[in-house]
Amino acid sequence: MEAKYTKIWRPWPGIDGGDDRLSSLPDQIISYILSFMETKYAVGTEALSRRWEGLWTRVSNLDLDNRLVYDDSSGDDLKIVYASDAKRRDSQFCHFVDKVLGEHKNLNSLTRFRFHFSVEHRQYSTVLRRTRFKRELVFGPAIEEIDVRVCGETALGIPQCMRCIPENFYTLKNLKVARLSGVVLGAINRPVFLPSLKILQLSYVKMKDFESLGRIISGCPVLEIFHLESCHPSSKNESDRIEVSLPRLKNFKARTVEPRIMT
């Protein structure tokens, strides 16, 4: 006699009455899990249910990239705006940055911060000035990785004050990785000490002089990887030289080409 099998359908957790174990976790654990997601998706979890509202505001990582941003104007729960609609994308990104930095409960607790803005429309360079990016972004003592990139032919529409790295950057004791592109390193009026920094990558960075660069490098005693590309000082002096001691350096790359976005 041929055996007969009955297929039994069981719902996935959280669907049609199934157990939603994830939502039953403590807020702190859920926020920790959301920290591993790109910020646009972490914010989008608010659409799942009331239980998820505001849980993303305590994540320890922020990943802000205007190539793919959260769009809450279309009526959809979560929609991604692609590069084909660049104007709308840049506008949405500015509002998204404002939302994230304004609603996050404790920016000082961040361990990783990534901000990529490819500026394609000068008018949105102006919009970005009004966001909380400069007013509220100060790296906290817990930060371990910083990745800031501002690029594009209209990046000059963003004033230097908006592209300036916060002054406390130079004394972040737990910072391990710093990737900076298209930003401004202002005058260094304090000792530089980055005791944990192992990776430093600078490209198209504007700085006062080579002495400032030397002070930064000298303040990184455990630096292992150092990449420098198209970083020209505001005041050029052919006699400028940098002499530093980096006993743990394993990888060094330098490339100088006149950048398009430098002033």
Image (cartoon, grey):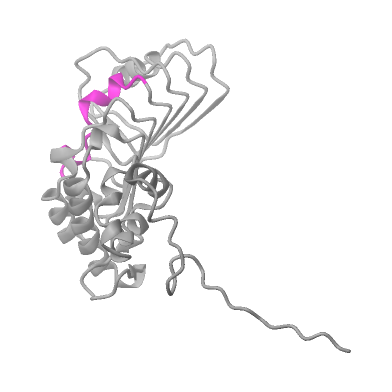
Q: Residue at x 36, y 58 (%)?
A: 41
**Residue occupying the point 29% across, 21% down:** 170
In the rendered view, would you say 82 is above or below 208?
below
Outermost bottom residue: 1
Does residue 66 appear to the left or right of 163 in the view shown? right
| Residue extending farthest front | 1
Instruction: Work out whether residue 137 or residue 41 is closer to the camera in this orientation and state it.
Output: 41
Please state if 24 lies on the left or on the right of 262 as rendered: right
Q: Quadrant of residue 176?
A: top left
Q: Which residues are magenta?
A: 159-173
Tell me residue 145's x, y (percent): 39, 34
**Is the magenta region chiefly helix, strand or loop?**
helix
Q: For the image shown, how many numbered marks are present on the structure?
A: 0
Percent x, y of residue 171: 29, 19
Q: Is residue 118 visible?
A: yes
Q: Is residue 115 magenta?
A: no
Q: Where is residue 61, by image quadrant?
A: top left
Q: Residue at x 58, y 78 (%)?
A: 9
Q: Position of residue 37 (x, y in %)?
A: 41, 51
